[in-house]
Amino acid sequence: MKKKKIVAAVVAAAVIVVITGAVLTGVYFGTLKDALDYVDLPLVAPEENSYTVVDKTDYYLGHPDLVYTGDGRLLTAYPLGHGKGAIVIRESTDMGKTWSERRSDLPESFADSQETPTLYRLDFNDGSEKILLVSGCPSWTDDDEYYADGFNYSLSSDGGRTFGEFINAYGVEWATSMPDSGDDLYTSYSADELPNFDESGKVLPYDVIVAMSSLTRLKNENGGWLDAWMGTFHDYDFYNYVSVLTFDSEGKANWSVPRRFLSSQREKEAEIDLCEIEIFRTPSDELVLLGRANARNSNSVISVSADEGKSWSVLKELPYALTGDRHKAEYDPVTGKVAVSFRLYLPGIKPNALSQMNELGGYWVCWVGTPDMLTDYALNPEKDKNTVLGDKMLVLGKTNDGKSDCGYSGLVIAENRVVAVSYGKFSRGAKVPYILGVSFSADLLK
């Protein structure tokens, strides 16, 4: 009799488990959400033959950038690891359809990069060109070998065929060379240019994250190009800085004293943890800022400057169609469209009713619209985050696990082609992120 009761109890428990499992499975699939369902734009995907696997291994690869050289080549750079790790560079001579093997001729200092590299082409008024590679040096964790050390940069004068060893800016060496707080030197600094000091008044190196998230060539008051570029980065307190790159008569690079450039909007900047700022120039010479809201309590934000970054309009939340991380924007003069590649990441939406997360992602996308759409939205108080903004959304990649570790990318529009590289677990069975490239006709932007 006792044995029968035990068997009955076990059977009853098993039935409860099966029923509970079935109910939870039903709840899971019945409440499953997809980030694209919240984008009020036509969704378009490039043809399958537009894609090329740039690099795929059994370990983590991520966070690539991309640059187009003056002689028509593409260079992509990325670290062997999550953020930090040895820098890899590959080259394409056919607009991203195929890629070379990893370069073996890189500077020794590239072997121990502290953060994701960024790439930019500098075109000078005398017709010359340089390729710039930058890698931030943030402190990762208290027990990590990496510590706050400003940022490293390397320059190439031959289209990226060779690079110089890293040069450090605003790191430990700079900090130890600076006088203590209270020195007369600082009376010439604005409040936003003052460095951070420790309790004893000694200067601290800048804790630089994603340097340079954007690099924008500046113009003079008459609209002529300057040989000067405004770079952006942020720190762990989510102050956003600009530092202007110039060159002396002998070609030596100089980065201006980093300046906190959104102090007039510090409350909003700190509230949303604004970071990874992208700034691009419209044909009418407004500068448009797109930024990540890392606190996940806001959509991404937009702002506009009409005075070369000296002042900015009120930071304004964007619709879901432009909400996410690490925006990279390029203007195509042929179609008149702006393409913005980024990681789609929507705050305040649970992936399903059982999830403990309150954010929804899983896609690498590219927003398409006109410059006027962005500036009008940013400056028109009657438009809000519920506005339909844009022409279409290009769906470039989807992660196989629905998670958001993807989408940082480099983006180039040239030779009537759109080329982008990103990272993620974009194929079935992929266990770690890999580098994926896409190359398609710019006609898709129309």
Image (cartoon, rainbow, N blue to C red):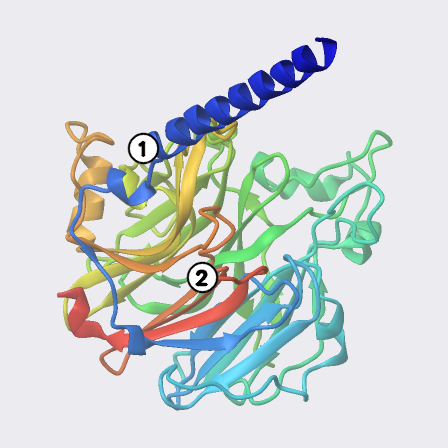
Where is residue 94, by image quadrant? bottom left
In terms of depth relative to the viewer, which is nearer, 35 or 93?
35
Front disc: 1 or 2? 2
Q: Residue 360: give x, y in percent of width and height.
A: 41, 38
Q: Amino acid at mark 1?
A: Lys
- Locate the N terminus by quadrant: top right
Question: Which residue does the image show at 25% across and 68% down from the upper left?
Answer: 46
Marks 1,2: beta carbons within 8 A = no
- Residue 402 tag number: none
In terms of depth relative to the viewer, which is nearer, 200 or 137?
137
Q: Which residue is mark 1?
A: 316
Q: Which residue is mark 2?
A: 426
- Locate the C terminus by quadrant: bottom left
Secondary structure under the numbered disc 1 in the rendered image = strand
**Vertical relation: 138 (above or below) 419:** above
Q: Amino acid at mark 2?
A: Phe
